[in-house]
Image (cartoon, grey):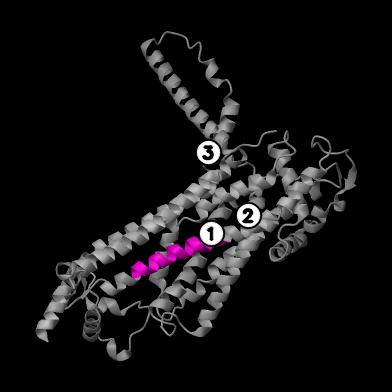
Amino acid sequence: MAEHGGAAAEAATLEFTPTWIVAAVCSLMVLISLAAERCLHYLGKTLKRKNQKPLYEALLKVKEELMLLGFISLLLTVFQGLIQRTCIPPRWTVHMLPCQREVSATKEHVAAAQIVGRIGRRLLSEGGAGAELCQKKGKVPLLSLEAIHQLHIFIFVLAITHVIFSVSTMLLGGAKIHQWKQWEVEIQKDAVGNGQPGPAKVAHVRQFEFINDHFKGMGKDSKILSWLHSFVKQFYGSVSKSDYTTMRLGFIMTHCRGSPKFDFHKYMMRVLESDFKKVVGISWYLWVFVVIFLLLNVNGWHTYFWIAFLPLILLLAVGTKLEHVIAQLAHNVAEKNSAIEGDLVVKPSDDHFWLGRPRIILYLIHFILFQNAFEIAFFFWILTTYGFNSCIMGQVGFIVPRLVIGVIIQLLCSYSTMPLYAVVTQMGSFYKKEIFNDHVQQGVLGWAQKVRMRKGLKEGGAAASVAAEPSNGGGGGGNTAGPSVKIEMMRRAAREGNDEAGVSIE
């Protein structure tokens, strides 16, 4: 028996593993990896063929996240031996536990014996040696190989869940926004002649449906009523036809007055697709959130339950704010005019948004989607790894509300908040670079770069000339300021910072 045990122990290493097993396992892993890579490659070619550049860039972002996950997994694998050889006193392992040990097992020497005894997985031969080294010192490894393996799985499940949730949100939200295309077609069909407004007629401000829906009067009470109305309206008919028509006209009259037949719906969809590559990624601050949650996931605190309310509260706040921006647009018109000649035109402004930055809304939606995906991923990871009755899972009274909240967040964000975001954030002071098609964007960006290079060379030449001939006058050089206003406008339009990517022009 001892000889068989020794042989089994030796066979656990690669030196004593049959070559056909090694070749078979490697072949399977390579085939699966190549199949996944080819699928992503052909998906990217399809998106490029259909001129879906924003979605193609989002796909590249997904590949970056997968590469990051692979690097994290590689680091965990490479350094697991070092982690095993890092020994800590047993008393450090009896505090801040996700699951409380039994009372009889809280003594330090018993806890240490249990921890060392549970190290049964041998992903690398040096891992077992590290555990034995710590045991000889009367200490325990910093992290067991089993825990490292489970951490691998959790990170992978989290990233995949986040991508799936983000894609589903954008698809469902995009389907909702696509229904507005009919409104765009009807508006352009109703345009008179060459698209210019019809004969001007004077109408009382209350005769406009947009004003009646959103203006709740003057005074403090009306402000409270307006906020309450904005909170409730996000749950039903978040964007009506009058809302879309009025905001569309406000955008066109502010940013492209010379193009009354501008396809606002197409522009809005292009902006949304461009923002998708931001939503689908996992930024550094989201990883910070994951680390903080793992730190605070202590037995008895029910952190996983209370933190489920955070994305719900943020989502309701974002939806209310977006609805209130529409109400502010109506309020600004109603309080300044008793009657309006011609069409109702609202004035977009960054002042309607938090800190004067519409871009903040996107960051909040990004965090909401990630945190909701984190909750669902954590649930399924616990379910598949430890089972439904695990102490980390908690009581049924804590599990069901989490799942219900997750479903509510996903549906509300897809069918209400995301469509609201798509149209309301266009009511800022600046337009986005997506107002140009891809060829124009590339041309403007190249033009702006050449202008900066040429300006830098001229400034450098002027400085050298002054240094060489200090007595000479500075004549010439006036041509550098020629089309400065247009250059600055186009450069800002090409800038990647979408929120400040252009200037309003009359």
Residue 441 visible in this rendered orientation of the protein? yes
In the rendered structure, which disc, 1 or 3, sits on the residue that comes first in sequence? 1
Quarter location, residue 26? bottom left
Label 3 environment density (alpha carbons within 10 Å; few <14, some 14–19, many ≥20): some
Q: Nearer the viewer, residue 265 or 498?
A: 265
In the drawing, does residue 220 fall left or right of residue 163? Answer: right
Q: Which percent across, then down, holds residue 108?
A: 23, 83
Circle 2 crowding by C-alpha within 10 Å: few under 14, some 14–19, many from 20: many
Quarter containing the C terminus: top right
Is-magenta flag for residue 165?
yes
Between disc 1 and disc 3, the foreground one is 1
Circles 1 and 3, Cβ within 8 Å, touching? The answer is no
Residue in the foreground of this view, choosing between 422 and 89 = 422
The residues bearing labels 3 and 2 have C-alpha atoms spaced at a distance of 21 Å
Question: What secondary structure do most residues of the magenta stretch adopt?
Answer: helix
> In percent of the image, x 44 and y 54: which residue is there?
40
Q: Is residue 83 visible?
A: no
Question: Residue flagged by tag 3: what amino acid is it?
Answer: Arg
What residue does disc 2 label?
A: 421
Which residue lies under the disc numbered 1? 167
Magenta region: 151-168
Distance from disc 1 to disc 3, alpha carbons, whole Å, reads 26 Å
Residue that numbered label 3 is attached to: 495
- Mark 2 or mark 1: whose residue is earlier in sequence: 1
- Give the image location of residue 135, x and y in percent: 16, 78
Spot the residue most to the bottom.
104
